[in-house]
Amino acid sequence: MSRLGDRATIILPGATEEEWSEYRDAWIDARDLAWLVAECYLRPLGGAANTLCGHFVWHDLINQLIQLTGSGQLIIHKPLADITEDELPNKHFYARSWQYSNQKIQDGLGYLPARLWQATVAEVIKPTVGLHR
């Protein structure tokens, strides 16, 4: 995503809101992950479990970054096939629709995420706002 910050317009896949809202990835704050690792050491779940606290839509994540940094960039959505490598390198990365469940961790450890992606992004961006304008 580092190249996205260098552009006035950010291109993302998805011709319609219905389409681009399906392009997502999984999220977990490293601090929540550390808690889960320690809990699993003390109380093993007896098998593999997905570890996450939710999913984010790429449009929403990038829009929040734009808002937090005040960069003024615009997001334009295009059909995946119409996006060039120059507009969005590795465009297929941004066109995945990951769906995971953390039900096993919730049931086995009583896990409730302490940090949602919006709060973590804001916390990370806050010290850098104004440095790159």
Image (spheres, helix red, strand yellow):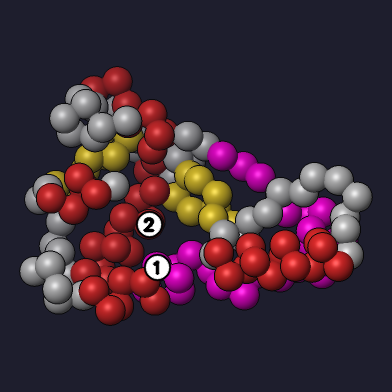
The answer to whether marks 2 and 1 mark residues whose Cβ atoms lie closer than 8 Å is yes
Which quadrant of the rendered structure holds the C terminus?
bottom left
Q: Secondary structure at mark 2?
A: helix
Residue 44 drawn above or below residue 81? below
Q: Is residue 39 left or right of residue 20?
A: right
Disc 2 to disc 1, C-alpha distance: 8 Å
In this rendering, which labeled residue sits more in front, label 2 or label 1? 1
Residue 121: which disc? 1
Residue 45 drawn above or below residue 119? above
Amino acid at circle 2:
Leu
Q: Secondary structure at mark 1?
A: helix
**Is residue 19 in view?**
no
The answer to which of 67 and 29 lies nearer the viewer is: 29
Report crowding for label 2: few under 14, some 14 to 19, many 20 or more residues within 10 A (C-alpha): some
Q: Write down the quadrant of residue 114 in the picture.
A: bottom right
Amino acid at circle 1:
Val
Q: Which residue is label 2 attached to?
A: 61
Residue 80 horizontal/vertical position (percent): 32, 26
Q: Earlier in the sequence, mark 2 or mark 1?
A: 2
Magenta range: 98-122
Q: Write down the quadrant of residue 42 in the picture.
A: bottom right
Residue 17 horizontal/vertical position (percent): 37, 43
Q: Residue at x 44, y 45 (%)?
A: 21
Q: Write down the quadrant of residue 61 in the picture.
A: bottom left
In this view, the residue farthest toward the bottom is: 127
